[in-house]
Image (spheres, rainbow, N blue to C red):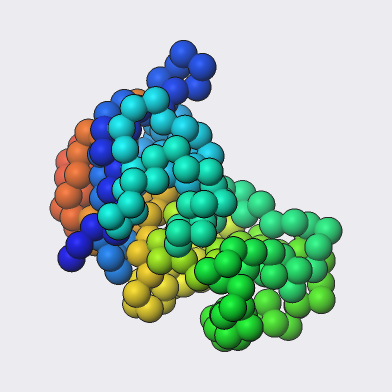
Amino acid sequence: MTALLRVEGLDLYYDDAPALTAVSLEVRRGEIVTLVGANGAGKSSLIRGIAGMEPPRAGRVWFGERDITGWAPHRVCELGIAQVAEGRQVFPSLSVADNLELGAFSSRSRSGAKRTLEEVHALFPRLRERRRQAAGSLSGGEQQMLAIGRALMASPELILFDEPSLGLDPRAVREVFETLTLLQQRGLSILLVEQNVAASLRLAARAYVLENGCITLSGSGAELLQDERVRQAYLGV
């Protein structure tokens, strides 16, 4: 499979403090790639660097054949990269319908917004049922559905997920992982940052371990799930 996303030698700093050092990875078309690491390892920084929210100091980010290094977030989204941020970040005072509509702001998504909305409602029937409710009145699991649905409204080729199961009850966590599988089966590419290491590695075609801002291990999800270093550091085995 060809690489849809390539990150090459990325350095990212906050003031003079390094967050990422020479990070390289790729996400191929139609696959789920998991990024594993402890809190503070730089996982969210990498997501923000790809999405254009934090400009890198060195290195390149490629989407297909385009060098998108340092692009503004709206240009990155316009090209076909959407993000489901940590903590869901829905607009609590707006209705479910309005939150979804905001996801279709780009020119690539506006023309097909009606059809995409029907697809989102088919994937998440509860969002149709609650379309007039304020987003802040939804449960945590429903808000995560809304955050994913809003990302889908942008008609992306690649979705960056930052801790999608954080703070959810076990049933909602299962629904999130089932949704990720469905999205991958529909041809979407996914870069997944997730605290549930075992579940995310079982889901992933490939995975990377990020420690102190550096990639220290990579391989298939199954290989890292059996790696003794991963098992001791992240699975408590």
Q: Point out the residue furthest to the top here.
A: 16
User: Residue 209 falls in which quadrant of the image?
Assistant: top left
Picture residue at 28% right of the left edge, 65% below the top = 29
Residue 217 is left or right of residue 134, and the answer is left
* Front residue (pair 94, 177): 94
User: Residue 141 falls in which quadrant of the image?
Assistant: bottom right
Work out whether residue 182 can be spotted.
yes
User: Residue 143 falls in which quadrant of the image?
Assistant: bottom right
* Front residue (pair 36, 154): 154
Residue 61 is left or right of residue 72, and the answer is left
Q: Is residue 48 above or below residue 201?
A: above
Picture residue at 51% right of the left edge, 17% below the top = 15
Q: Is residue 204 above or below residue 55?
A: below
Q: Position of residue 78 (x, y in %)?
A: 51, 59
Q: Quadrant of the N terminus?
A: bottom left
Work out whether residue 121 can be spotted.
no
Q: Position of residue 202 (x, y in %)?
A: 29, 61
Q: Is residue 11 above or below residue 225?
A: above
Residue 127 is left or right of residue 207, and the answer is right
Q: Position of residue 46 (x, y in %)?
A: 41, 39
Picture residue at 42% right of the left edge, 49% below the top = 193
* Front residue (pair 73, 202): 73
Q: Position of residue 219 (x, y in %)?
A: 17, 49
Picture residue at 81% right of the left edge, 76% below the top = 132
Q: Is residue 132 above or below residue 52?
A: below
Q: Quadrant of the C terminus?
A: top left
Q: How many marks?
A: 0
